[in-house]
Image (cartoon, rainbow, N blue to C red):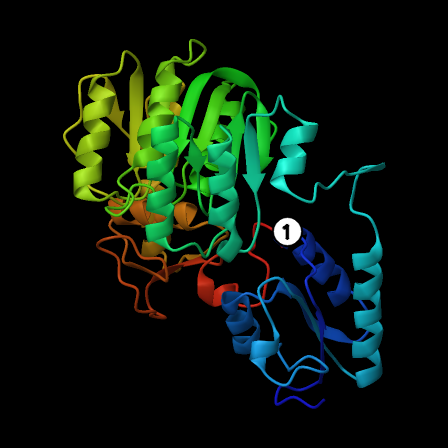
Amino acid sequence: MSNPVQGHLETRLRPQFYLDSVALMRMSRTLVSEAGVQDAAMMMATPANVEILRNAGLLDLPTGAAADGAMGPGDLILTVRADSAAQAVSALEVAEQLLSQPQQVGKSQTWQPRSLRSAVATHPEANLVLISLPGAFAVSEARKAIRRGLHAMIFSDNVPVEEEAALKQEARELGVLVMGPDCGTCVINGVPLAFANQLPRGDIGIVGASGTGIQEVSCLLAGMGQGISHAIGVGGRDMSGTVGGISTLMAIDALEADDATRHVVIVAKPPAEEVSRVVLKRIAESSKTYTVCFIGGEQPQLPDNAQWAGSLTSAAEQAAGRTLTAADSGASASARTQNEGFLIRGLFCGGTLCAEAQVMCKAAGLSVTSNAAIPGVSSEPSPDTHTLIDLGADEYTQGKPHPMID
């Protein structure tokens, strides 16, 4: 099949064949290393993924499919663009071989349950499930989990915010915690989940509506010789007006009841005003101390047991018992860079890290633009200003792995 994009495009469909998105992305990277391959993708045929592949010029109708309607969200799309038809077909054969191999961790074959019910039957002692499914299926599986008394971490994205709110409302009534959707990082009882690091144990808890924010703060703490009790991700939309901070409040309750937690760090982009008030009221009722870091937002009125951090660095330093000095902020170095006629070009693999850099540039009086602009920063690109780019934004991940995976 010819394709308007230079090269030869071949697409195949595996009906009713599900595999975790992270595993599929790893396999896609293997295909790109094959001779003559320009690009490749292996994705479940959800409407969102079909649109991503089509926008990336990586979707042709699979052999035997008369229309897009022949594909369903439970089907797997294999697609390769290569220099020649032979190279594209060869790469697809490699993909088929990869799919036929058992998934392994280290040297041990991993048992993959066919259903949540079979997993619970095999491991009745488990009380948490990590869900990484296409968004169309994630909420239904999470609902099964919470109704069995399991906490749920939902790695999946593409879940409507209204469904997230309804799920978390039910979980709250059942007394279990939902972390996510689009929750990429958690550390529970010292166990790193999804995109998390092996960290020292300590007495600082983190609640984050930001995966990269959790990662940055926890790693900075580790670098200062501090450890964490738990890092609870709640999903980037948890503190929106629609969701109402349900999981954030439940995570605060959990850390309040945890004797191993002395201090709590809250990390998020600016929440809805009404949610911020509720969260700060709950903090005021706590017996523990807090650091509040709403990246890019204005400092709210804080209770006596909380302190404000304008950046992830200062959040970690405050939690560790250190205070930032003027020199620590880097403002003088940034101003000197501007005076010498240089422009900053910042490339980030996380939106919160990009937001933090914008805060620091604003504090230094620098004119900056960004595709993930915080309040007070322009999103209009300009060659004459400092520019900070979040490479994890949707426009850069169409048909590509998120840079955290890549």
Identity of the residue drawn at 18% across and 17% down? 304
Locate residue 362, reporting x and y percent.
26, 49
| Above-or-below relation of 264 to 86 | above
Identity of the residue drawn at 45% across and 57% down? 158
Locate residue 316 relative to residue 401 in the image: left or right. left
Locate residue 386 relative to residue 152 in the image: left or right. left
Locate residue 159, reporting x and y percent.
43, 54
| Above-or-below relation of 292 to 348 | above
Question: Residue at label 1?
Answer: 22
Locate residue 191, reporting x and y percent.
59, 26
Is 158 or 143 nearer to us in this picture?
Answer: 143
Q: Name the kind of residue labelled 1 in the image.
A: Val
Identity of the residue drawn at 62% across and 21% down? 125
Tell me if I can see residue 40 in this picture.
yes
Identity of the residue drawn at 35% across and 52% down? 161
Secondary structure, mark 1, is helix
